[in-house]
Image (cartoon, rainbow, N blue to C red):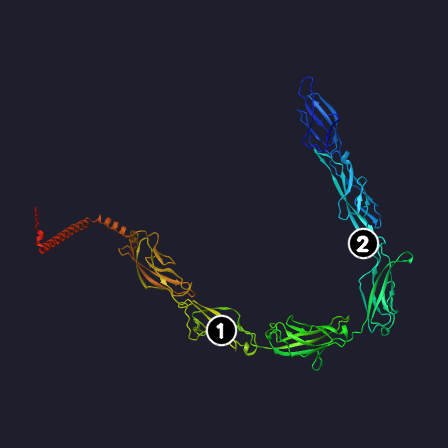
Amino acid sequence: MALFSISEDTPVGTQLYILNGTDPEGDPIRYGLMFEKGSKEYFSVEPKSGNVTLVLELDREKQDEISVLVSITDGRNKVVETVRVFVTDANDEPPEFQNLPFIVNIQEDAVEGSSVYRVQALDKDMGSGGSVSYFLQPSPVAKFTIDSHNGILRVKPGAALDYETTPTHFVTVVAKDGGGKYKGKHQVLTSTATITVNILDAQDMPPSFIGTPYFGYIYEVSVPGSEIFTVYARDGDQGNPNPIYYSIIDGSDGVFDINSTSGCITLTTHPSLLKNELYEVKVKASEVGGDNHLLDYDIAVVTVRVVDLNNHPPTFYGENGPQSKFEVTMYEHPPAGEILRGFKITVNDSDQGANAKFKLRLVGPSRVLRVVPQTVLNEAQVTIIVEDTSVIDYEKGPTLSFKLLAVEIDTPERFSATADIVINLMDTNDNTPKFTSEYYIARVAENSPGGSSVAAVMANDPDSGPWGEVKYTIYGSGSDLFSIHPSTGLISTQPWTTLDAEVRSKFNFYVKAEDSEGKYSLAEVFVTVLDMNDHSPEFDDKLLEKTMVIGTPVKVEAVDEDAESPNNVVQYSIMTADPDNAFDINAETGEIQLKPYIKSMEIVHNITMQKDCKWSLVVQARDLGSPSFSTTAVVNIDITEAIKERVISYFMGLSKRPLTVFGICLSLVITLILLTVCISTILYCSAVKKSRINPESNYIKVVRRPK
């Protein structure tokens, strides 16, 4: 591996070299690599095969030579050699600009081709990959160019710099290397930087007036020295402006003067001595250069008008002279477009011309009224017209108030005058009584006495006087049991009404609210009769006879005639029983059954100690109402077994009584003999009777056929 070289872009894991050695005695040998302490271990070796592999990435710009100790050993002897591995370059480093950021100043009158700045970029690579060339990114307005070799930025031929248009240029320069191999491919690397070029203003623009055209006014109260107007001009070279000198060059007629520094135009004589109503004064603004020389200039015209003083505001007049309040009384809801003829209003301004021109408008609820005319010159009769009739509503307010405002249009004083417009409204019957709800729900107990209150309805009519008074009536199915107070709307049962939830628990009817002119509205009333616990449960009879087959329950039932739960819900219980502790009862269904241990008649006989198996108990039926009512009944129960079990039991009993068995068998034989005799007798009598009716039937009839 002496003087061995490797490219810095070689991938990690690449096999670089194969070490080869021998031992004179023929012993097996092993290879090794060692690095100086503290240095990076870039390679590894397979001890047996001698394959050397790259294990760390290389970077020539950081380390271009690697020293490594190569060893070979047979286990007893070891030979070590020092080798130097050279790292060759690959194009992996882009150019780097020096001395960033790039900021440069240049005069706007710099000629084309002038040097602006020199940029420099360095590339750490070697060969073509380390060479750098420069170019500019394309721009819509290219003012500069750059030398591709030395990086000198210059003003582009044919380009002119203008501070007033673009005071700062941002130029993007690209540094590109010469390209080279990297990981088997040709690669070109670039870097970019921005050069900020600030343009320094030069004296190449004349001054200009700002805010033209100019107008000034002279009033009759003006005095000599009064300011009429101030002109303003500024140097076009705002980056380095010169002072401005003002002067009047024409149109003054000796009555105006101007401050050369501030541009303020003043009056030099009394207005009464002025001969013209209109003056056009030419004003010159010049730049002041070095040694107070006047340079470039601009000219503007100031139009000065001599006007009369606006000393009369608009005034409102009524039939008897100036008036500040106008009032009218009218009915609510006049039709849209109607003129309010109750107002007699005139407005006047004693000035002349523009000083006598003013606008009229109403201030108040918008779009309710409209004033005509809206623009007045000198004098006009004021007309007020209805626009929105819905707002002119007595119920919303018996009085409407507006301000009638007259304001001058073109005068600087903007004199104005106001007058109060008051409309007093008279009510009409324009509203229908309206219930507070479309329906009312009421509840009344069934035991309530006649005349009891049920519910209260309410309707409102915002009209005034008799139109706002509401009268209540009721009608509809079931309403005959109820009455309503015509003024308060209180609904009560009739004095003679008796309510019974078991007979009828729901009523609904209509209530009517009507004003004095017959306008009305309706609402529906739903009345629920609340059930009260006024019935006791009742059995069919106070003494009940039941037959119970062992294992099958018997049922008792009591009926409660109340209309609703829980008043009509019945629960059952056993009060007393004979024998005691022999029965259970289902509290909800009333089913009575024997205790689980009583499973046969034998157990029943053991309990009673007699052949009589008729037991009795007292059952109570109680409702769940409040207060609760109850009733009792005596239940006599005859205890029996099922038919099959009774037959088997009967025959098993006969085996113990042979005489009884003999008697039964003899009875069966006699019964069969008697039945046979009866049937034979009936058949004989039938045959005798038949022979008497048709004797020929006893003979055989022979019929001879002809041959």
Residue 20 screen position, x and y as percent: 69, 22
Label 1 secondary element: strand
Left or right of 579, for residue 1: right
Residue at image x 84%, y 50%?
Answer: 109
Residue at image x 77%, y 74%?
Answer: 353
Foreground of the two, 202 or 496 = 202
Left or right of 676, for residue 52: right
Disc 1 or disc 2, which is closer to the eye? Answer: 2
Type of the residue with mark 2: Glu
> Splitting the image into 4 quarters, where does residue 254 fall?
bottom right
> Splitting the image into 4 quarters, where does residue 153 fall?
top right
Q: Quadrant of the N terminus?
A: top right
Q: Residue furthest top?
A: 25
Answer few, some or many: residues within 10 Å of disc 1's Cα (few below 14, many 20 plus, some between 14 and 19): many
Left or right of 277, for residue 406: left
Residue that badge 1 annotates: 512
Task: Measure the alpha-carbon separation of dots 1 and 2.
Answer: 86 Å
Residue that badge 2 annotates: 164
Left or right of 153, for residue 418: left
Type of the residue with mark 1: Lys
Q: Is residue 125 visible?
A: no
Foreground of the two, 545 or 20 = 20
Residue at image x 35%, y 54%?
Answer: 595
> Splitting the image into 4 quarters, where does residue 131 fall?
top right
